[in-house]
Image (cartoon, rainbow, N blue to C red):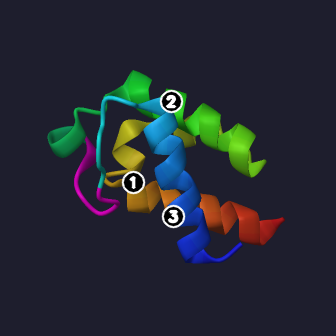
Amino acid sequence: MEKEEVRVELKALIGDTFPELEEVEMDKDITTEYGINSVSIIRLIVAAEEKFGVKFTDYELALDEYPTFGDLAAVIKEKLDKE
């Protein structure tokens, strides 16, 4: 899966997981722009694990690991490339 495909798929997943976020930009800060907290990011990561068939370690569930949705997309892409 190409980088842009991962970003598009993740953006759709964000919309499904957080329907209250009408439009998201992948490179904006997720805590200040979208109010994402540690519980919210775990919900999104669990959904991403199911959608993309990847696994995150407990250490990778921390909110500070993903300042933007684009950062999360990059980690998903790396995990897909390793498989």
Disc ID at residue 28: none
Q: Is residue 73 magenta?
A: no
The CA span between labels 2 and 3 is 18 Å
Residue marked by disc 1? 69
Q: Is residue 5 above or below residue 63?
A: below
Instruction: Identify the magenta region.
Output: 25-30
Q: How far apart in space, not on screen, are marks 1 and 2 (Cα)?
A: 13 Å
User: Going from the N terminus, do you reach mark 1 or mark 2 first?
Assistant: 2
Among numbered discs 3 and 1, the one appearing first in the sequence: 3
In this orientation, does residue 69 appear? yes
Quadrant the N terminus occupies:
bottom right
Q: Which mark is residue 42?
A: 2
Location of residue 58 by image quarter: top right
Q: Residue at x 46, y 42 (%)?
A: 14
What secondary structure do most residues of the magenta stretch adopt? loop
User: Between 78 and 47, which is closer to the camera in this rendering?
Assistant: 47
Point out the residue furthest to the left here. Answer: 32
The location of residue 32, given as percent across then percent down, is 15, 41
| Residue type, label 3 | Arg
Secondary element type, mark 1: helix
| Left or right for 41, reference 22 | right
* CB within 8 Å, label 3 to label 1: no
Query: For numbered disc 3, what is the local secondary structure?
Result: helix
Give the mark nearer the N terminus: 2 vs 3: 3
Give the residue pinned by disc 3.
Answer: 7
